[in-house]
Amino acid sequence: MKIVHLSDTHLGARQMHYTDPRGRNAREQDIYDVFTAAVDKVLELQPDAVIHAGDLFDGYHPSAAALGVALDQVARLRDAQIPVVIVAGNHSTPRGAATDHVFALLERFGGVHAVHASPRLVEIGALAVTAVPHCNDREQLRQWITEAEPVASASFNVLVTHVGLDGLGHVGSSEAGSVELSGETLEAVASFDYIALGHLHKFDRPRINAVYAGSLERLSWADDARRKGIVEIDLAADPLDDSFITMHALEGRKHLRLPEIDASQADNLTDAIAAAAERDDLEGAIVRLPIRDVTVEVFGAIDRRTINAAFKECLHLELDPHFLDAGSAGANPAAPQDLRAFLAQRCPAGVEPAEFISRAEAYMTKAAEEIGA
């Protein structure tokens, strides 16, 4: 009995201002493309079931494009007679109880068990899947998880849920509606053959039979996962054996963090930044270039046109300056000179700071390009 576990696909998520030839946001299309590639791999593997551990969509009112991609890919799995179980994550769960849930539409489409609002048992031959969706009430979600029990008559039992665990970081977790529970929560359901987790955007294995599959695309620089992909589980194997879990890597948009530039050692910062582009792996990439020991004046004086020309092969270049202290810059010591620190201080409650800062920088980059800076 083999299953494929994936999670946090965030269909419909948009980043930056770049568009493809059809006018669609380039990062939105990246997410659709890697989701399609994931389904391609599932069809190659031919598992007994697919388990999606939440945040199928980036919001609970997905766009027509996002919904269309989801339905098209579910149809491919349905046509291949591969059952799909999806639980709602915090992104896919309305804040108000009266709001209709998009998962109700998915279920009417057929070919998928889309679980929301309350837990449900899904039986697929010898496999019993206890599906626990996200709940905005932390205590209710904890109770749903800890009270879940394997089905005695089933040959294999899987628990799937979307929740953060204390101590595992906040990649994709510091969001409105997210819930984190104690890691001890998993001990209450340790008797399941496998626990498919969603919410953390990096692959992680908090216990021998419990795994976060992670997201398929990097959605912020806080995500430093070595690789992305889907997880194949052989439920008949011993969890201690290497054959129990197989990660199948998928290639999404390339993210590159370039070697840091020390501005205090650069005769000409513009030239030093442009020289960093002299490599052959930048095409289509999202690039971050840290710059340390730089003053506000020197950074403000760089030639953006020269730098943009040097990095023209990239989708996006993000300069990451770490300014000298305010006193050395000759500015008001009380004023925050580091842009990232300034933005972090003003990040709205419930919003992931890294995503807030990334979007703000993208808007500023676009404005600079439009005015020819």
Image: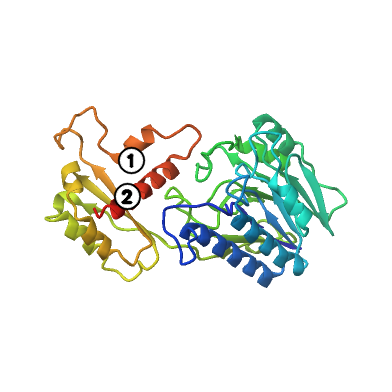
Q: Quadrant of residue 185?
A: top right
Is there any visible trace of residue 193 in the rendered image?
Answer: no
The residue at the far left in this view is 267
Using residue 103 as the reference point, say whether residue 309 is left or right of it. left
Is there any visible trace of residue 53 in the rendered image?
Answer: yes
Labelled disc at residue 340: 1
Q: Is residue 274 above or below residue 53?
A: below
Q: Nearer the viewer, mark 2 or mark 1?
A: 2
The quarter of the picture where the N terminus appears is: bottom right
Q: Quadrant of residue 241?
A: bottom right
The kind of secondary structure element at disc 1 is helix
Amino acid type at circle 1 is Arg
Residue 162 image offset from top left, x and y in percent: 64, 44
What's the residue at 54%, 59% (across, down)? 31
Residue 11 image offset from top left, x and y in percent: 58, 54
What's the residue at 39%, 32% (across, down)? 346
**Towards the viewer: 244 or 270:** 270
The kind of secondary structure element at disc 2 is helix
Residue 84 image offset from top left, x and y in percent: 73, 58
Nearest to N terminus: mark 2 or mark 1: 1
Q: Is residue 364 above or below residue 47?
A: above
| Residue carrying label 2 | 367
Q: Residues within 10 Å of mark 1 (few under 14, many from 20)?
A: many
Residue 27 image offset from top left, x and y in percent: 48, 58
